[in-house]
Image (spheres, rainbow, N blue to C red):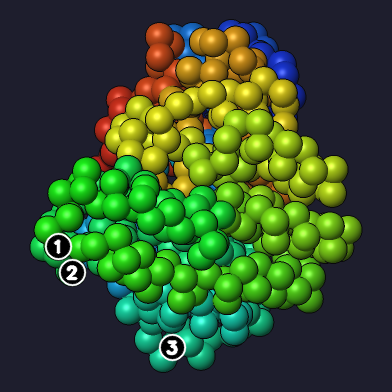
């Protein structure tokens, strides 16, 4: 884009992302990709006449573009920390489009076995500011191969953390996952697939989780096997003609356990690599991994920037989740909560209680989407509901999705995350009556979403990048 090209946003209610202030009746002047001025009065006629494009927000809320630091299925390369087969390209771009329509302008890929080349190839064809983490460590690679590994090629196995960080990876992660640590990934993908392959019968997420917990408990422990409960669940979900309780036990153990111990050890290994290369590490935090996550926090948080992912995980009871997060926070760990799927699919989260308690008690530092089986709730939808319930103020919540993330992962969104002079113009303009609806998205000073739809020529933002 021509650096002299001027975009003027007028009549805006600006939330800067960096503090709790709200700037009303404000205007933003963008030249090229940089915010060059924020006016607290209406722009003069000379400024208006100088603008190449004018967006009159009509009093709508204007925020920094969302910085989502935990996403899957947004690049080429193996899917999940389990190294599953990559998504088709069309699905990858569909996911990127969905995130952009939700107001996201920067996205961190946590399918950490993708190569830099695979990520860069995706970036060439989409305006999203897309970065990646890496999980190319020996134990995490081994855990992926034990859990699945069907998407891992030799190039993924031979790639090193050093190479990835040298070429642009901004974090170590995601370290551990529901697939490798007996969590949601097992519930919505691997256990249903294993049951279907063995019996020909499909089961849903809730049934898979119930069967898993009857066999291994929520902390993934062989000693928790409950034969009577397992038999009851097998009968209730229509599998009694296909499986005995013992056969179900064996199937669950063979599906869930092979990667479990290795993945637990991989969490500490991830912290070691993060310390070595001076980058953050994003760790899978859930019932089954919480003990090792706390141990790693106590040992490494003084020297490693640790982000505990989805501390509102549905495998944790509300009090348990909050108590655990307090301990992590005392160590200096950043507390992430995920948006869940309460509104879209409601397969993995059936309540907002834990999420809202994290917000109410100001325990959460950042918020992201994760994957949720491909049906995550938009971050702005969760923010809208929390603000409506007076759990948190809108400026505080927006900071969690923008400035706080930029601070915690410095190389993810440099010079972004707040609306201020000299910052990159990554902006979302929200609907006046419904802040979860995004009217306009601007990335690198270029409009990519207009009137809630992706602009046809939005790819030309790519030509403005250094």
Density class for disc 1 (Cα within 10 Å; few <14, some 14-19, many ≥20) is: some
User: Left or right: 102 with respect to 6?
Assistant: left
* Residue 330 in sight in this render: yes
User: Left or right: 425 with respect to 364?
Assistant: left
**Residue farthest toward the front in the current orientation of the protein:** 228
Residue 76 in percent (x, y) is at 36, 69
Pick whichever, 324 or 67, lies toward us. 324
Residue 293 lies, with reference to residue 361, above or below; the image says below
The residue indicated by pointer 1 is 242
Pick whichever, 185 or 305, lies toward us. 185
The quadrant in which residue 250 appears is: bottom left
Density class for disc 3 (Cα within 10 Å; few <14, some 14-19, many ≥20) is: few
Give me the C-alpha separation between circle 2 and circle 3. 32 Å
Q: Are marks 2 and 1 in contact (CB under 8 Å)?
A: yes
Task: Report the quarter where the C terminus lies.
Answer: bottom right
Q: Which mark sits nearer the N-terminus, 2 or 3?
A: 3
Pick whichever, 347 or 130, lies toward us. 347
In this view, the mark in front (2 or 3)? 2
Q: Which mark sits nearer the N-terminus, 3 or 1?
A: 3
SS label for mark 3: helix
Density class for disc 2 (Cα within 10 Å; few <14, some 14-19, many ≥20) is: few
Name the residue located 60 percent from the left edge and 10 percent from the top edge. 390
Residue 284 in percent (x, y) is at 58, 56
The residue indicated by pointer 3 is 155
Residue 267 lies, with reference to residue 17, above or below; the image says below
The quadrant in which residue 326 appears is: top right
SS label for mark 2: helix
The residue indicated by pointer 2 is 198
């Amino acid at each position: 884009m021509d650096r002299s090209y001027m975009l003027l946003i007028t009549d805006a209610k600006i939330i800067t992302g960096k503090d709790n202030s709200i700037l009303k009746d404000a205007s933003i002047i963008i030249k090229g990709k940089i915010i060059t001025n924020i006016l607290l009065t209406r722009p003069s006629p000379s400024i208006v006449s100088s603008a190449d494009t004018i967006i009159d927000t009509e009093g709508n809320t204007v925020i920094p573009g969302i910085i989502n630091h935990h996403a899957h299925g947004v690049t080429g390369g193996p899917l999940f920390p389990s190294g599953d087969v990559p998504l088709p390209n069309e699905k990858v771009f569909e996911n990127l489009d969905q995130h952009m329509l939700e107001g996201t302008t920067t996205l961190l890929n946590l399918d950490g076995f993708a190569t830099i080349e695979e990520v860069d190839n995706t970036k060439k064809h989409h305006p999203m500011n897309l970065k990646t983490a890496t999980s190319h460590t020996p134990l995490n690679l081994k855990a992926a191969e034990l859990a699945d590994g069907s998407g891992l090629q030799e190039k993924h196995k031979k790639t090193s953390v050093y190479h990835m960080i040298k070429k642009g990876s901004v974090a170590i992660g995601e370290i551990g996952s529901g697939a490798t640590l007996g969590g949601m990934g097992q519930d919505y993908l691997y256990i249903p697939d294993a049951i279907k392959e063995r019996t020909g019968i499909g089961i849903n997420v809730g049934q898979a989780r119930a069967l898993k917990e009857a066999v291994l408990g929520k902390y993934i422990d062989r000693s928790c096997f409950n034969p009577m409960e397992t038999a009851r669940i097998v009968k209730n979900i229509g599998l009694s003609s296909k499986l005995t309780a013992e056969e179900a036990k064996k199937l669950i153990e063979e599906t869930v356990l092979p990667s479990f111990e290795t993945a637990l050890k991989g969490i500490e290994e991830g912290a070691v690599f993060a310390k070595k290369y001076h980058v953050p590490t994003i760790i899978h935090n859930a019932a089954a991994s919480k003990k090792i996550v706390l141990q790693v926090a106590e040992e490494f948080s003084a020297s490693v920037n640790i982000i505990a992912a989805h501390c509102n995980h549905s495998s944790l009871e509300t009090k348990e989740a909050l108590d655990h997060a307090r301990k992590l926070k005392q160590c200096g760990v950043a507390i992430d909560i995920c948006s869940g799927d309460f509104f879209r699919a409601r397969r993995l989260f059936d309540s907002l209680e834990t999420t809202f308690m994290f917000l109410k008690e100001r325990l959460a530092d950042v918020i992201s989407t994760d994957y949720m089986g491909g049906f995550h709730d938009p971050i702005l939808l969760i923010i809208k509901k929390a603000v409506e319930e007076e759990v948190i103020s809108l400026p505080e919540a927006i900071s969690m999705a923008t400035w706080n993330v930029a601070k915690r992962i410095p190389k993810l969104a440099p010079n972004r995350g707040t609306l201020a002079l000299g910052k990159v113009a990554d902006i979302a303009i929200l609907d006046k009556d419904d802040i979860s609806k995004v009217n306009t998205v601007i990335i690198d000073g270029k409009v990519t979403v207009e009137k809630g739809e992706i602009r046809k020529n939005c790819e030309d933002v790519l030509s403005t990048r250094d």
